[in-house]
Amino acid sequence: MGFEINETVSVLNARLEAFMAEHIYPREHDWSTWTLNQDNLWQTPPWFDELRELAKAEGLWNLFLATRI
């Protein structure tokens, strides 16, 4: 039915999985701790901006934009 993953998406998926394993999953406990001690959930932890910049540098930020694929 045409739902096969092409090579571009497969490569992007592998890069995203590697980024998540290296940078995001290790921070899950930090995130949970930070949100429990935070009154305003609209704020971000101090390390969030660093992760965002890493994702941007690797081309993994705003993946929903049509220009990514």
Image (cartoon, helix red, strand yellow):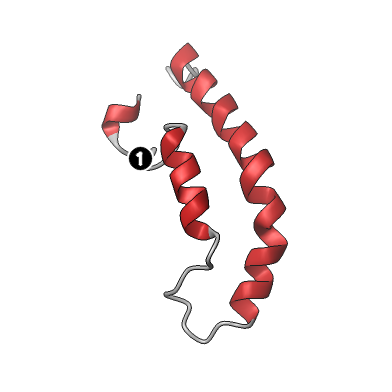
**Residue drawn at 64 percent across, 80 percent down:** 36
Instruction: Say above or below: 31 vs 63.
Output: below
In the image, taking residue 23 as reference, residue 63 lies left or right, namely: left
Q: Tally the marks.
A: 1
**Residue 20's spot in the image, x, y percent?**
62, 41
Quarter of the figure with residue 2: top left
**Residue 47, image x and y in percent?**
55, 60
**Residue under the image location 49 percent in, 12 percent down:** 7
Relative height, residue 59 to residue 7 (above, below): below
- For the residue pair 1 and 35, the one nearer the viewer reads as 35
Q: Is residue 36 visible?
A: yes
* In the rendered image, the vertical position of residue 5 relative to residue 23, given as above or below: above
Query: What's the residue at 67%, 59% (across, down)?
Result: 28
Q: Is residue 27 above or below residue 6?
A: below
Nearer to me, 4 or 32: 32
User: Is 40 left, or right, of 20 in this rendering?
Assistant: left
Looking at the image, residue 26 sits to the left or right of residue 5; the answer is: right
Q: Where residue 44 sits: x, y (%)?
A: 48, 68
Q: Residue at x 53, y 19 (%)?
A: 11
Mark 1, residue position: 64
Q: Residue furthest bottom?
A: 39
Quarter of the N terminus within the rendering: top left
- Quadrant showing the C terminus: top left
Secondary structure category for the residue under label 1: loop
